[in-house]
Amino acid sequence: MSNSTQYGFYFDSSKCTGCKTCHIACKDRMVGISRNKDDVVNAGVADLPGMLWRRVYEYGGGSWSQNSDNSYNQNVFAYYASLGCNHCSEPVCVKTCPTGAMHKREQDGLVLVDESLCIGCQSCAQACPYDAPQIDAARKIMTKCDGCHDRLEQGRKPICVESCPLRALDFDTMENLSNRYGEGDGHFAPLPAASITQPSLIVKAPKHAQASGSSAGKVLNVREV
């Protein structure tokens, strides 16, 4: 799949402190106007309890070893990753959707859900390596980050980007992001290999970043706040 204009995210893990402000701001945008499938939501998005469209992962590991003189060496590491939908160039969620509900918009490359077509089969969720599509069990409809397209139409950036106190997140066309930040670093754990979906995401790795797929650490915390 290709789009003349493709929007995406930039994430600088070296700046992220794991404060979860982006996570909370995303939840706050779910203003609870309506949860009826046939009603029009005229601001924000519907109230979606339990949905985590943007998640902050703490990833850490390492060990200590004792020397013969009773001193210690250590290779302990910990860092954060803020992650949502990456509106991929080759979205596996779109490819696996049997009804066409999951689709990629031509004008900006955002991957969205047409709720009128969704049958809640969760094929998209099973395929996505980023855990972006999430089921609204009450309505039996898949939901996901929509790139805050209502804010984009107002000339604003997604709420997660505007809320970050350390400016670790940015959102723009991929061309503009590349000009601003370069091509970034390769995906690091716990992110999956970028080759799976060609995500619209540029990342700057933290100190002591572990390679994508590494078993040196584990996700320590992604609980809802």
Image (spheres, helix red, strand yellow):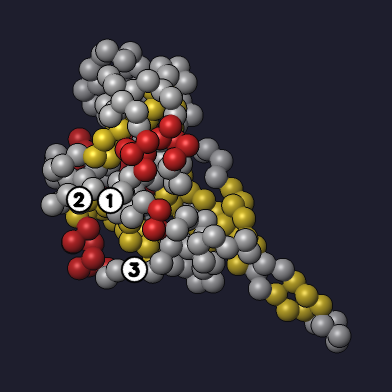
Relative image position of residue 221 (x, y in whole percent): 59, 48
Q: Amino acid at mark 3?
A: Gly
Q: Which residue is mark 1?
A: 89
Residue at point 22%, 58% (across, down): 174
Say the numbered circle drawn on residue 191: none
Answer whether labels 1 and 2 touch (C-beta < 8 Å). Answer: yes
Q: Which residue is mark 3?
A: 184
Reply above or below: 98 against 222: above
Q: CA distance from mark 2 to mark 3?
A: 21 Å
Mark toward the start of the polypeptide (3 vs 1): 1
Left or right for 21, reference 6 = right
Eye-nearest disc, 3 or 1 = 1
- Count every numbered label the image shows and give the total: 3
Left or right for 62, reference 113 = right
Front-lying residue, 96 or 118: 96
Q: Which type of secondary structure does the marked residue at label 1 adopt?
A: loop
Answer whether labels 3 and 1 touch (C-beta < 8 Å). Answer: no
Q: CA distance from mark 3 to mark 1?
A: 17 Å
Q: CA distance from mark 1 to mark 2?
A: 6 Å
Reply above or below: 127 against 31: below
Q: Which type of secondary structure does the marked residue at label 2 adopt?
A: loop
Q: Which residue is mark 2?
A: 2
Relative image position of residue 33 (x, y in whole percent): 31, 19
Residue at point 23%, 48% (across, down): 1
Q: Quadrant of residue 175?
A: bottom left
Q: Amino acid at mark 2?
A: Ser
Can I make out residue 26 in this image?
Answer: no
Reply above or below: 220 against 102: below
Q: Residues within 10 Å of mark 2 (few under 14, many from 20)?
A: few
Mark toward the start of the polypeptide (2 vs 3): 2
Mark toward the start of the polypeptide (1 vs 2): 2
